[in-house]
Image (spheres, rainbow, N blue to C red):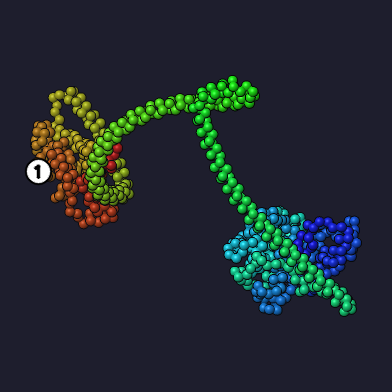
Amino acid sequence: MSALTPPTDMPTPTTDKITQAAMETIYLCKFRVSMDGEWLCLRELDDISLTPDPEPTHEDPNYLMANERMNLMNMAKLSIKGLIESALNLGRTLDSDYAPLQQFFVVMEHCLKHGLKAKKTFLGQNKSFWGPLELVEKLVPEAGEITASVKDLPGLKTPVGRGRAWLRLALMQKKLSEYMKALINKKELLSEFYEPNALMMEEEGAIIAGLLVGLNVIDANFCMKGEDLDSQVGVIDFSMYLKDGNSTKGSEGDGQITAILDQKNYVEELNRHLNATVNNLQAKVDALEKSNTKLTEELAVANNRIITLQEEMERVKEESSYILESNRKGTKQDRTADGQALSEARKHLKEETQLRLDVEKELEMQISMRQEMELAMKMLEKDVCEKQDALVSLRQQLDDLRALKHELSFKLQSSDLGVKQKSELNSRLEEKTNQMAATIKQLEQRLRQAERGRQSAEEDNRLFKQDFGDKINSLQLEVEALLRQRNQLEQELKQERERRLQSSQRFPEKVSPKPVPKMDGKHKIQEENDKLKKPLEEGHTILPTKLQPHSDDQQDQPSLLGKPQRCQLCREEGSPAKNVCKNCGGTFCGACSARELPLPSSIRPERVCNPCHDRLLQQYSSQPLIRPRTEREEALPTKAGLSQPGLGEGITVVMESRQGRWKFSELPSLLPSDSK
């Protein structure tokens, strides 16, 4: 229930009291707030009578809640409309002292309080709309700034003051309608704070949230620090909105005055009722404060009483222990005294028997305590023995640890020496590593240089193969043809020998008049054979590609046939010497002078003897021969791209072919496969 309706917690009066109260006081539940243009009107309900009704419909809680929701919605409409119009007239900037703005916050406070569930606290029941407003922070993250600012304000001490400050900051931020819509849409969260028939849970709450959108055109400035929001009384001033609804129908002036007076009386009665409610609440607060102080005093007294009781309990324990000690010492004396007392005072048998039973019980207790003490002593002795054994073992462990400590210290010293030696060794190794790194860098540089040389040699070899590949193939074919020719000549030579042998056997007396030409042909074949074998076996030189015809050799040496001489190398009588070495000038047979080499004094390869050939080969292999080039040679190698004389490690050989004379470095890979 809000402040717009009479309190319902009063006891049910009798019929006379109800009639008297209805005659004296005008309550809002008898009137309905309605809008007539721009004014608020109170219309009297026809279903309310001053006579008691067995089942009055106006006392139904749902009916009353619906009536209150309608009244609050109409008040909110009037307040928002008047606030917007006045703000437009004043320049859209308002402050906290503006009366319509204050009334708007009062109406919003009543709307938020309508149907709010009361929370039970130490001081009683408390209704605060600050709890629902805190939920807005979870629904709209932008509202967290407002909530934090409200909590940081130093002058706010009550939840009501925080809620009022929150409404003012939301209006300044121009997002009050957005926050209210987000809050109303979460009915499941609002159900924790509001009753099912509350304004925030019904359709009227959504209507009010929609009306708040128009307040975004207003600029409001509030100073929250100096304003006392905790002690403000939220009472709606109806004088700004009240007007008689029948005035528009042209009623008489008396009726208007009567309606205005009735409204004035209602407002005064409402104000009086609110003041009484405030006084009652203040009295309750004072009573609760007094009861609180009384409870604190009683709590202090109870604490003191507890302390004294504890002290008394300690004192009683000490006395009981003293009595037990005295009973232990005087057990025998008590027995003799009891025996004498029993013999002397038989009349008090019952009392003494009871006393005896008590003493026996106490004795049993002492005996049990003694047994427990003996058991405890045994356990203590056993524990002492175990601790002594543990002490002996610990001493032994301590001695072992000391010996281990000495051993570890010795090992530590030796390890320190080892570490020093290793550090020195490490430094030396680092120096060697640096030296090795420098050496590796030098070797890498040499390797790169060698790699560049290898790449250049491979490129030259590739160019050489590209230029002379076809020629090498043709040379190989010619060599194969010469080999076949040599084999054929050898077969013919064998056949000729067989024929001569047969003819000599048939005609032994006849001697061939001219054996020299036959021997000359044999030597010529042997010479050609040597020419073909030597380059293939040694792989140092490449033979000329064109052999001289047999007739040329016969024409070059006609004079030697007539003058047989001994060979200076083999010294055989049957071997005629027919060749002169161009290097040493000696005379040799065809077998001993079958090789040719280029000489510095000649252009063509000249015939040399075998010793000169070996010596020249050794000389050429250590230092390649570079012969001056002729004009014809200057032109030909440039076309082939082989003007460098030092392409390989072999000697420089001049090759004669049909195309001309060529000079190139020997490459062993150019030899035919069957000659290796």
The answer to which of 46 and 329 lies nearer the viewer is 329
> Are there few (<14), some (14-19), or many (20+) residues within 10 Å of tag 1?
few
Q: Residue at x 59, y 46 (%)?
A: 305
* Spot occupied by residue 522 in the image (x, y as percentages of width and height): 19, 34
Where in the figure is residue 33, as x and y percent of width and height? 81, 68
The image quarter in which residue 404 lies: top left
Identify the residue shown where x is 79% and y is 63%.
Answer: 5
Q: Residue at x 76, y 68 (%)?
A: 271
561 to the left or right of 425: left
Amino acid type of the residue that numbered disc 1 sits on in the rendered structure: Gly
Drawn side of residue 193 relative to residue 47, left or right:
left
Q: Looking at the image, can residue 187 be seen?
A: no
Report helix, strand or loop for mark 1.
loop
* Coordinates of residue 169 in the picture (x, y in percent): 63, 67
* Quarter of the figure with the C terminus: top left
Quadrant of image for the N terminus: bottom right
Given residues 111 and 530, the one toward you in this image is 111
Residue 217 vs residue 259, the one in the foreground: 259
